[in-house]
Amino acid sequence: MSKPLASGHKAVPFEGEELAKQLRDFPGYRLGIVRLTPGDWMFPIDYVKFADKIYNFKYRPSDVMVMTYPKCGTTWMQELVWTMRNNPDLNHPMAVLPVMARSPFQEMDMLVGDLAEVTSDNNPFYEGFRLLCPGKDPADGLMLQLSEAIPDPRTIKSHLPFSLHNPALLDTVKVIYVARNPKDVIISYHHHSRLINMHGFQGEFKDFVKYFVDDDLVYSPYWLHVKEAWEKRHHPNLHFVFFEDLKADVIGELKKLNAFLDTKLTDAQLSDIAKYASFTEMKKREAAAGGNEAEMEFFNSEVVKKDGGFFRKGESGDWKGKFTPELEAMVDKWTAEKMTSFGITFKYAV
């Protein structure tokens, strides 16, 4: 891994005690983990297999990318944007497919590990791949090829930061970036990391918080992820959104998106889309399209039964009462040092 990636980053594998600690708490990363420099970005080792393909991905001017750190409301924004652009009258035939089968998660392939889990009949995303990529080999990147194959106008999701995409991205496509209060990110990412076997988190909540503030979670550092987008927020092709604002006034934020995307939707259409893409309605549709989460190979059935599945709460301020005073103080200190320092503030951070 001494050869630099197309982005100019170098991937350094975890070894020794550092690797052992990660594999103890995240057994889903059993194939290995890498740290990218510069930036100290952390990813499963399979990121290296797809990094250059993602960096050199052929975008079209009609594309829209929804970019966030994990668990910042990405799936909700995906559904809003895809519906506004492809299904404004709520009658598109592809709407019956899961969100990620028509608005792909571009780099998901790096998280898979065992391709058999992804290509099983229990995986609803594979249905979209078979439909849109006949004859293609999932080993070459199921989600990456799905991103190429979905019909225009394409809406693509990525959790990668700007620095791992081609610098021409913003000059080619429109990007919607969603940021969220770090405490809610921690709560949601903790649940997600326990729920999804690709992560398989086994530690305690306090351990997860420590991983977050130490930039030792996959896709971290969160602060740098947000900083890279915040510094580009005045670019005409970037729309920067706070999850909290979207929750507080979804119609107001949809009107801003309507202007940014130039979708020219009526107030009545926006109102219908807000309801259609609400947490409750999305949860119903995904359950109908994807089956029982407790029976799917890539979900931890015990976590689903005890704490809920992929669509858990979708709330703002869910962190309250879930941090000890010591953990809350740790995150507040981290937020002040890492995020407030470059000028961003979160309405519900304290």
Image (cartoon, grey):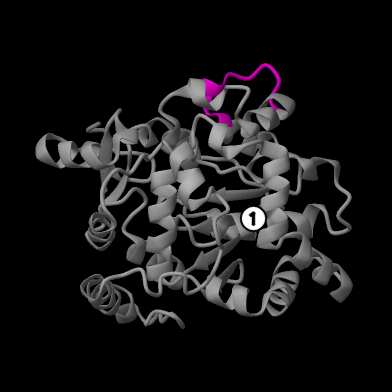
Q: Quadrant of the C terminus?
A: bottom left
- Where residue 258 sits, quadrant-wise, is bottom right
In x, y percent, where is residue 256?
70, 76
In the rendered view, tell whether residue 188 sits above or below residue 195. below
Closer-to-camera residue (93/276):
276
In the figure, is residue 345 to the left or right of 122? left
Viewer-proximal residue among 167 and 314: 314
* Picture quarter with the N terminus: top left
Residues packed near mark 1 inside 10 Å, few (<14), some (14 to 19) or many (20 plus):
many
Q: Nearer the viewer, residue 27 or 142?
A: 27
Q: Which residues are magenta?
A: 133-142
> Residue 21 falls in which quadrant of the image?
top left
Magenta stretch encompasses residue 121: no
Which residue is under mark 1? 78
- For residue 61, say whether it is visible: no
Judge by depth and name the residue closer to the eye, 284 or 59: 284
User: Is residue 49 depicted above or below 61 in this figure?
Assistant: above
- Residue 199 x %, y %: 37, 40
Q: Residue, x 29% and y 59% (percent of image)?
A: 212
Residue depicted at 49% across the width and 39% down the height? 108
User: Residue 181 in the image: x percent, y percent?
Assistant: 43, 72
Q: Is residue 42 visible?
A: yes
Q: Amino acid at mark 1?
A: Gln
Q: Main secondary structure of the magenta part?
A: loop
Residue 79 placement (x, y as % from top left): 69, 55
Q: Secondary structure at mark 1?
A: helix
